[in-house]
Amino acid sequence: MKVLLINGSAIKNGNTFRALSEVAVTLEKEGIASEIVQIGNKPIRGCIACGGCKKNGNGRCVFDDDVCNEISAKAEEADAFVFGSPVYYGQPNGALLAITQRMLYSNGGAFRFKPVANVAVCRRGGASATFQTMNMAFEMMNMPVITSQYWTIAYGQKPGEVEADREGMQTMRQLARNMAWLLKKIHADGAADLPQTEAWQPMNFIRQ
């Protein structure tokens, strides 16, 4: 079993990385492999609703000049996910949202029914709004959202300051234990029987 952790901060070894590392270390202690992938600080495209990913049918966004498809490929081999983001103006990093939206739309099958958790790291305010925003996309993908003893948020500004947030770090560790517990339950019989789904019945509010 393996959990893919996505560091949505442009700062490689900042507080978001430290919070995710606390999760990763605890997962390893629980016998669950992990990998932290950083989105980096290079330009990342937003979805332009071209539909190209549906036409090519390979589970990849047609824009292949950033890290989106690289992370999407790793998602196919992962059993669960943890997305971490710093708080920018009370919201997740826009680059992380762009990657998430493109991956879920082009390669949703790699994510459906896999457990996910979201971590928000901030200096002062906006953590809960960021946390809620991040959860919304995955709740549309039939993905069990892993919880902890508190909302999975942590506080710090300068790199490393988040380590002083004792409760925040404890919350990360409990998140990891809860993730490991569910993964072990799912894989106890070697394969999970997924819930039955119905054919999607889309309905717009405005109709002619």
Image (cartoon, helix red, strand yellow):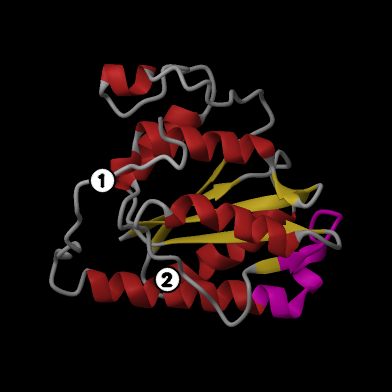
Residue 62: x and y in percent read 41, 17
Residue beneath the point at 83% across and 62% down: 125
Residue beneath the point at 41% across and 34% down: 207
Position of residue 44 in the picture relative to residue 71 (left or right):
right
Up the image or down, 118 lies above or below 71; here it is below
Residue where numbered disc 2 is placed: 179
SS state under label 2: helix
SS state under label 1: loop
Residue where numbered disc 1 is placed: 200
Residue 40: x and y in percent read 64, 34
Pointer 1 or 2: first along the chain: 2
Residue 104: x and y in percent read 41, 40
Q: Residue furthest front?
A: 208
Residue beneath the point at 20% across and 56% down: 197
Task: Quote the CA–CA distance across marks 1 and 2.
Answer: 29 Å
Q: How many marks?
A: 2
Which picture quadrant has residue 130?
bottom right
Which picture quadrant has residue 185?
bottom left
Residue beneath the point at 70% across and 64% down: 128
Asked whether the viewer can see residue 4, the reply is no
The residue segment tinted magenta is 154-169
Q: Amino acid at mark 2?
A: Met
Q: Amino acid at mark 1?
A: Trp
Which picture quadrant has residue 38?
top right
Give the number of the mark in front: 1 or 2: 1
